[in-house]
Amino acid sequence: MNGHDAARTWWHQARRRPVDDAYTLWFNAQSRCTHALRAWSTAAPARRAAAYRAYLDELAVEEEAAGMLERLHLQAAA
């Protein structure tokens, strides 16, 4: 095996799987959701409504990412 073949083999093994990308997407969404929940819980009364709406937006993104992760996980298991 020459260097070019070794590099190509390494590249194919190093590529991320779609489920890995979905996990990263979910993890980041979950982190943002947690931050928004904390911001809502500590918001001043005048900012509570806006903080709640921001939390709901982040929660929707997290739920969508979790659903995508679950679908990919089920496909990989099949």
Image: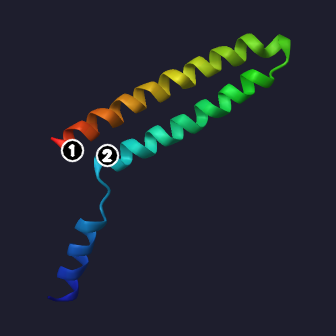
- Residue bearing mark 1: 76
- x then y, percent, for residue 66: 41, 32
Q: Residue furthest bottom?
A: 2
Compared to residue 29, the image places residue 7 above or below, namely: below
Callout 1 touching callout 2 (CB < 8 Å)? yes
- x then y, percent, for residue 2: 17, 89
Q: Mark 1 to mark 2: distance in Å?
A: 8 Å
- Few, some or many residues within 10 Å of mark 2 (<14, 14–19, 20+): some
- Few, some or many residues within 10 Å of mark 1 (<14, 14–19, 20+): few
In the rendered view, does 59 fall on the left or right side of 64?
Answer: right
Quarter of the rendering containing residue 38: top right
Amino acid type at image mark 2: Val
Secondary structure under the numbered disc 1 in the rendered image: helix
Compared to residue 43, the image places residue 33 above or below, namely: below
- Residue bearing mark 2: 19
Q: Residue furthest front?
A: 77
Instruction: Name the residue at 54% across, 23% down.
Output: 59
Quarter of the rendering containing residue 64: top left
In the rendered view, does 32 fall on the left or right side of 39?
Answer: left
Amino acid type at image mark 1: Ala
Secondary structure under the numbered disc 2 in the rendered image: helix
